[in-house]
Each structure stands twice: as structure tokens, then as C-alpha cells.
Image (spheres, grey):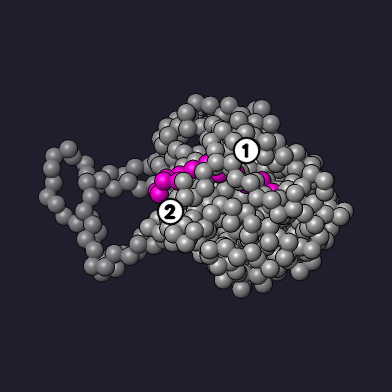
Amino acid sequence: MVSKIPVDVGLIYEGERIRKGQNYVDLAGPKSFGAELVQVAPMKDIKDGLVKLEGLDFKGMEEGKVYPFGLRINVAGKDMEEDIEGVFERRVHELSNFIQGYMHLNSRDTIWCRVSKDAVKKGLSLKHVGKSLIDLFKAEWSMIAKMQVTLYTDHEKVTKFREDARKVYEKRDSRLRGLKDEDVDVFYGCALCQSFAPRHLCTITPSRTSSCGSISWFEGKAATKIDPKGPIFEIPKGELLDEVKGQYSGPDEVTGEKSGGTVKTVYLHSIFDNPHTSCGCFEAIGFYIPEVDGIGVVHRDHRGTTPFGIPFSTMAGQVGGGVQSDGFVGMAIEYLRSPKMLQADGGWDRIVWIPKALKEKVADAIPEKINDKIATEEDSTDLESLKDFLKKSDHPVVERWNGNGTDTSIDETESTTTDQPVAEQPVAEASELKMPIQGLPFSGGKVTVVFKNAKIYAEKIIITRKEKRK
């Protein structure tokens, strides 16, 4: 039973999007910061049903502004263990979206929430959000005996809370390091985000944490014990079809079933051909850069652009929604520490660009021999400067340029043989001309531009020969 609040609460509102014109304020997200954390605590330390707010509530906020945001949930119950914390934490996303006029995206320290103008006008407060979460969690799990919620919007409070939360995230993540896919008999699947991305299914293995970073293999195991019919479930490994790419018959079959037959093959450890799908909650994006035959990685907190000249938010449109986009893949930051990280594509020897902050965060996972050869935004801001950096640093991908891999050298044939002006004539004329667009991300996958009755004029034609990538 959900407590009465000024707006409706129910499954019908899951998947509701609050657009810019409908939005009252943003909490956390790309223009601010925040975190959420669920922790198990002793019974005596929790006042059941308590909701505390430290900072401004919606009515004290200025419309159109962005505020930091923190959400701490403490739970207690008989035989409740720490393994369940990450599972409950991930369900915050689902249950928050049951509240009409309140939108929740992402997880951990990348959360982004919005409240609509209509909801605020009706009287919705952050304390109502906290109270609804307590009611929804208790309705879902009878094992929860006590639960309390603390919400933060004060800048200093959120800063301190996020620091504390990150220490807990690191403790959880470190437990799994060293365990590999071949060490276990079963994987886990997570369909929590199918309300936003119907074709997406996360396959969670010891070597591949969920793309949102919230659910490790251990937490997947714990989730199936407390909620056998829930959105996190076992996936039989099945037959090993490709050890290097990380292809198993079990995940292929289950993904095909859960995606309605639209995704039939999944490579857990490759960015090419059949990469793992993503919903939109991924912490980072891996993206292929054909001009240098290398792979870049950008995380959600990066405020600048990639060598393509576009930011994370634009690139995310190519990766999210459950689409398999050849050359793009969403991933958890923890996956960068996996010994199987994009192993089919060369692993760290293929990584050519990564934001400085992310590079420092995963420095312990980067092989010493390659660390200084990977560019950051301080070394490269576009494709030309990236190529120059890779040459000067003697990055391993340079060997591919003139070897058996992609030849990125340009063999130019100019259409003019004189510096004198020539009469303007079309160099190509066709009733229909199809042009595939490559190298830049577009939402929805591969894009082909069709020109009808086209006449093409050009001062110069550049013909570039590129062999198939490997």
C-alpha cells in the first residue's frame, strides 16, 4: 500500500519522459553531480519510515535550475546481507519511475533526476519521493523490516555523501576482480531497463559487470535468491562458441527471446559486428575510430568532446535503446579493469583515446607499457592531432596502419592537374546516388543518404583505400 501523495504512483508511469518544456528542475545529471546508495544496517540504527531532507525541497528551488542530489537508503531485515545492497540500489531506478512527474535515469554517481512542472504544481515534494520509495520497496520485498531515507540537495552535503558512496562502490567492485567467466557455471541477465529499451538485455558475467555498473555477478546471484521471478535471472552459459569474442549459446538464446528476436548474437568482449546492447544507463562508451584504426572510451562525466568533435550525450544516441551499433558499445567503468576488456579487438593495445579523469580513475588497470601512449583531451582534440600523437608516442595501432590491418594512409588522386580555374562541370551525375555515412555516430545505427537526380560539383576528389579492419 503506497501512502497518499499529491501525484499518482504506479507501474503505468514507468518509462515516462519529462522533456525540457515540461521540466521544473534537474537533480544531479550532466550539469551537476550526485549519487545514490543503499546500505544494510542493524535494526537498532534505523527508524522505520523516517524520511529526512538536508537542503532545499522543490518549492524552494528556482524553476529551470540544476541542483546536486544525493539519495541514501538504509534497510534492515532478518538475515539480510551486504550482497543485496547493489540489487536494491539498482531497483531505485525502476521504482522511482513509478512516481508520476518524477524521472530517474542511470545509477550510482551518474544519476539524473527530473521533476515536472505539473508535479510541483500539484504539491509533490522530495519527502514524498522518499516516502513512496519506502512503500514500494516494502511492497516488493517482505524481507525488509525497516527502511529509512535521507535526501540531500545541499551542495556540501552532496559532495561529502558522494565521496562516501564512491568508497562503498569501490569495495563492492573489488570483490569480483580475479574471478573470470570460465570460473562459473552460470551468468545472469538483467531486464530492468526494458521499459526504456525493449530490445536490451544485460548479460552479467564475472568479467563483465552490468553496463550501468550497479550489478556485478555476485549481486546478480543474490538477486535471484531473494526475487526468483524478478527482472534479474540466471542465464545458462550453454556452449562456448567463441572464447576470444566471448560468445556463448546461452546468452545468445536468452537475448534473442527477450529482445523479440531482434538481437540474436552477442559478443561480450568485442566492439565489432555483434556488440553487447545497451539501454542508456551505461557509465561509458567505447567507440571505434576508423581514421586511426583504434578505439576510444568516453565516460558520462566528461564535459568536453571526443576526437569526433561530439560529446558523450550525442554519442549516447548511437548506443542506447537496445540497438547493436557496429563499432560502439556501452560499458561500466569497472569493465575497463576486466582482463577480458575488448580482448577480441586488442584490449588496451587498441585503446587510443580516453578522458584524463577516467584514465586516472582506472590507472591501476592500464598496462604500464601503453599508459603514456594513450591520448587524453589534453593531447588531442580532433582526429588529426590524435593521429599525430599516436605516431609520436609509437602507439601499437600505428603498426596496423601499414601492416595487415587498416591502411589509414591517404592515396590522393586529384581531379585537377592545373592551378588554373576550370569550367564548373559536374563530376558525377545520377538519377539516384546512395552514400553510406561512416565515422560519426547517428541514432538508430547505420545511415545511408540517398540523393535523387543529383549533380555533384567538386574542386578535388580524394580516393582513399582502406582494407577491412581486424
Which sits in the foreground, 155 or 277?
155
Give the residue at mark 1. Answer: 162
Of circles 2 and 1, the one toward us is: 2
Q: Earlier in the sequence, mark 2 or mark 1?
A: 2
Q: Which amino acid lies under the numbered mark 2 shown in the image of this protein?
A: Tyr
Segment tinted magenta in the rendering = 61-73
Task: Look at the numbered disc 2 and give the secondary structure of its residue.
Answer: strand
Name the residue: 21% across, 53% down: 457
The x and y percentages for residue 346 are 63, 43
Res 436 quadrant in image = bottom left
Q: Is residue 68 magenta?
A: yes
Residue 45, position in %: x, y? 79, 44
Q: Quadrant of the N terminus?
A: bottom right
Where residue 47 sits in the image (x, y, percent)? 75, 49
Placement of 250 over or under 204, stated as above or below: below
**Residue 24 - label:** 2
Residue 311 visible in the snapshot: yes
Instruction: Please indicate whether residue 319 sits to the left or right of residue 254 in the image.
Output: left
Find numbered disc 1 in the image and state the secondary structure of the residue it sits on: helix
Q: Give the CA separation, mark 2 to mark 1.
A: 24 Å
**Residue 142 image point, x, y percent:** 79, 63
- Count of labels in the image: 2
At label 1, the amino acid type is Arg
In the image, which disc is placed on residue 173? Answer: none
> What residue is at 44 percent from the left and 40 percent from the top?
305
